[in-house]
Amino acid sequence: MTDRTVPEAATAAPVAVHRERGVLARLLRRPLALLGLAIILLTVLGAVFAPHLVAHSPDEQLFEGLTIEGAPLPPGGQFLLGTDLLGRDLLARILYGARTSLIIGILANGVSLTIGTLVGVLAGFFRGFFGNVLMRFTDLMMAFPALLLAICLAAVFQPSLWIVALVIALVNWVQVARVIYTETSSLTAREFIEAERSIGAGSGRILFRHILPHLYSSIIVYGTLGISTTVLLEATLSYLGVGVQPPTPSWGNIIFENQTYFQAAPWLVFLPGAAILALALAFNLVGDALRDVLDPTQRGRL
C-alpha cells in the first residue's frame, strides 16, 4: 500500500500543474478573454502606479484647472482628460477611483463568495432540518431587491470604503449560495460519496477531499463574474450618495459630483462612466471564458 501511494503522490503535482497550464492556454486562445485581461491589467497598473502617472493629487483644487469664467477645462494640454467643476485633475481622480473599485470589488466579492460557498456547501451536504433552515434564510434574503437592501444597510451604517464593501458582500452572497447548494446536493447523492461513507470516511474528509475539489471551477467562475456586479453596485451606491464618500474618489461619486455639467462638459460624466463599463465588461468576458474552459457543457450560456 505504501509502495503505491508514493508514486501517486509524486505524479499528482505534475498532473495538476499540467491541467492548470492547459486551462490557461485555452483561455489565452480566446480573443475576448484576452481583451478582458488586458483591460483588467491596465486598470490594475493604473491604480497601483497612479502617484507616478499623474502630477497632482486627486483632491487638489488647481487655480489653473478652471477657465477664467470658472468652468472646467476640456481634455488636452496640461490635463489629459480635463478637469472637474472644482479644478481637479480628472485623470488623477479616475486613476485613484480605480483603486476604490478594485479594492471593494475584490474584497466584497471575496467575502460574499466565502459566505455563499459556506452556506451552500453546508446546506447541500447535511440537508435535513439544518439545510432547510439555511436555504430558507437564503430565499428570504433573495426576496429583497439587492440594490434596495444595500441602500438601507448603507444608510444605517456610516458610509466608508470598508462599510460599503461589507454591505455589498452581505447582499451578494445569496446567488452563490444557491448555485453551490445545487451542485453540492447533486454531488452528495453520487455513488462515489456513498462508497466513501460505506468505508467509514468522516464528513470532514468527504467535504474537503471530494466535494470542494469538484466545486472549484464554479467558485472561480462566479468569483470572477461577481466582481463586475460588485463594481457596478459600488458605483451605483456612490452615485446615490450612500457609498464611498468624498473626498475619496470613486467612479460613482465622480459622476454624481459633475452631473450638473453634463451638457457643458460631457467628458466629466462620460469618462468615469466608460471606466465603469469597461471594467465590468472585462470581468464578464474573463468569467464567461473561464466558464466555457472549465465547464464545456455550459458553453454559450450565461
Image: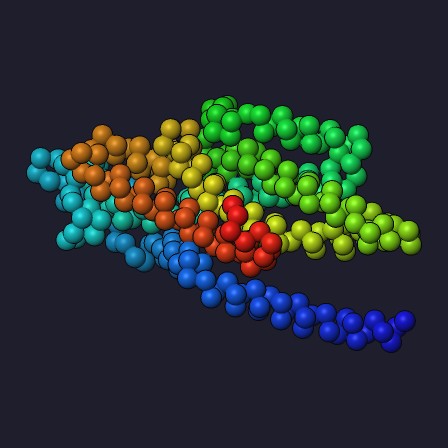
Residue 226 located left or right of residue 118 = left
User: Does the rendering let one see residue 37?
Assistant: no
Residue depicted at x 22% and y 30%: 260
Query: Percent x, y for residue 80?
Result: 21, 52
Outermost residue to the left: 68
Q: How is the image coloured?
A: rainbow
Q: Quadrant of residue 183?
A: top right
Query: Percent x, y for residue 8?
Result: 78, 72
Q: Nearer the viewer, residue 33 or 153?
A: 33
Residue 180 located left or right of residue 108 = right
Q: Nearer the viewer, residue 17 or 247?
A: 17
Q: Quadrant of residue 33?
A: bottom left
Residue depicted at x 48% and y 41%: 230
User: Does the rendering let one see residue 9?
Assistant: yes
Query: Percent x, y for residue 71?
Result: 14, 36
Residue 160 versus residue 211 in the image, above or below: above
Residue 281 versus residue 72 in the image, above or below: below
Residue 178 located left or right of residue 57 = right
Query: Percent x, y for residue 170?
Result: 57, 34
Q: Nearer the viewer, residue 250 or 141?
A: 141
Count of labels in the image: 0
Residue depicted at x 33% and y 49%: 95
Residue 144 versus residue 166 in the image, above or below: above
Q: Quadrant of residue 116?
A: top right
The quarter of the picture where the N terminus appears is bottom right
Residue depicted at x 36% and y 55%: 46
